Image (cartoon, rainbow, N blue to C red):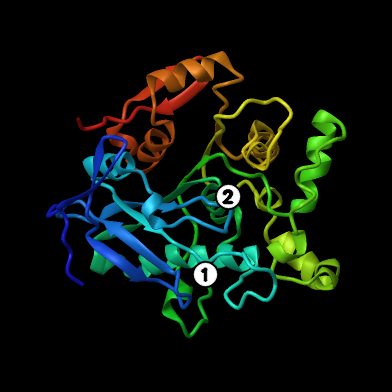
Amino acid sequence: MLILGGQLTLSSVKGGLVKPQPSHSNVRYGPDKRNVLDLWIPESAEPVPLLIFFHGGGFKQGGKQMIMPADVKDALANGIAIASVQYQFVHRDGLGDPERAGVQDVLRSSARAVQFLRHHSESFGIDKTRVACFGESAGAGTSLWIAAHDDLADPSSSDPVERESTRILAAGLTHCQFTYDLSKWIPEFSRRFGGGIKMFDSVDHAAFFGLTSEQYRGPEGVRGRAEADMISHLSPDDPPLMMVSFMSARKPLSLVGFSHHPLHVELVQARCAEVNVEMTALIPKERPEDGDYVKNNPSPVMAFLVGKLKPTEITPAESGNITIQALPVEE
C-alpha cells in the first residue's frame, strides 16, 4: 500500500479548522457495507502510534466524517496516526430491516477494525504495540467495550485479521454509557432519582440486540446482554481510561440527557476503583476543579491519549485532584 505520510492536502472546514485529506480513504475492514475507515498517517521514518476514533449517533446514525478536524491535526502534530471508523447500525426500520444488526455484533465488528489495522500495521507504518481508542456517545461506549473486553484474538482462525489482538493502551470516552445491557439503566437511575424515568420506555430493548421479544427473554438475550455489559467486563488488566461528561447531574429530561448523564461516569469510576483500573473522570458542570481544568485544557481526552501513547515526550500537568498529560497543540 502506498503511504502518503506528510503529503496532506486540505479539505472540509469545520469549526474554523481545516481537516487534512486522509492518507487512505474508505478502507474496508469487514464484510458489511459500512465497515470502512479513513486513515491519516504522519510523515515518519519509524512506525508511529495509532489513535482509533469511533463516531457517535446512538448506533442508528452518524459516520466516519464526524471526526473533529482538531483531533486529526493534534494527532498528526504529535506524530500519531489516526483512523476514523464507520460501523453498521442497529435496526432503524424494525426487525424487518434486512441490514439490522444487534449491538453486540456491532461492538465485535468495530473491534475488528483494531485487528485489521494491526494486521496491516507494517504497510501503514504503524506501531501495533501502541494503539488507543476514543469516541463520543456510542463511539465512546464502543471504545469502552474494546478496552474492557477480554482479548478477541483467535490464534487458530483461518482469517489472519482475527488472529490479531484487540487489547489497547488507553481509551478516551466522552458522553459514554456504562453498559449496553439496557435493563440496568432504569434501576441505577431510579436509585439516584426515584421513579418517573419514563423517556426510556419507548426504547425497544429486544430490537437493540437484533432479537424478537421472545428471543430477548431467552438464552440469546442473556448472552447478548452479558456480551454488551461493559462495566462487568472491567478487570485489573484493563488499560487506563478517561471519561468525560459535559452534562448536568440533574434528573434527565430527555433521551440524550439520559444516555450522556454524569451518572454513567460515576458508575464506571466506582467499578474501576473496585478492580484497580486507572481512571480519570471529568464532570465539569458538577465539580469546579474539573470545570477550571477543562477551561484551561479544552482537549482533555486528546491530551490524555497522547500522554499514554507518547509518555516520555509529554510533561504532566495537574489541576486540583486531576493529573493529566498536557498536549502540545500545533497552532
Tally of marks: 2
* Residue shown at the point (35%, 27%) measured from the top left: 326
Numbered mark located on residue 153 in the image: 1
Question: Dot 1: few (<14), some (14–19), or many (≥20) neighbours within 10 Å?
Answer: some
Which of labels 2 and 1 is toward the front? 2
Q: Where does the image place residue 103, in percent across and percent down from the top left?
A: 63, 63
Which amino acid lies under the numbered mark 2 shown in the image of this protein? Gly
Disc assigned to residue 318:
none
> Taking the image as drawn, is residue 271 in sight?
yes
Q: Earlier in the sequence, mark 2 or mark 1?
A: 2
Q: Amino acid at mark 1?
A: Ala
Vertical comparison of 71 with 33: above or below: above
Q: Is residue 200 left or right of residue 217?
A: left
Q: Between 258 and 105, which is closer to the camera in this rendering?
A: 258
Residue 91 occupies quadrant:
bottom right
Query: Within the image, what quadrant is residue 315 found in?
Result: top left
Q: Is residue 4 above or below residue 247?
A: below
The image quadrant where one finds the C terminus is top left
In the rendered image, which residue does mark 2 sit on?
A: 141
Instruction: Name the residue: 59% across, 29% down.
Output: 247
Q: CA distance from mark 2 to mark 1?
A: 20 Å
Q: Residue at x 53, y 52 (%)?
A: 57
Q: Element type at marker 1?
A: loop
Q: Residue 133: x, y in percent?
A: 45, 50
Q: If the image is split into quadrants, where does the N terminus sit?
A: bottom left
Residue 78 in sight: no
Residue 104 percent location from the top left of the image:
64, 64
74 vs 271, left or right, is left
Q: Is 165 displayed left or right of 96 in the figure?
A: left
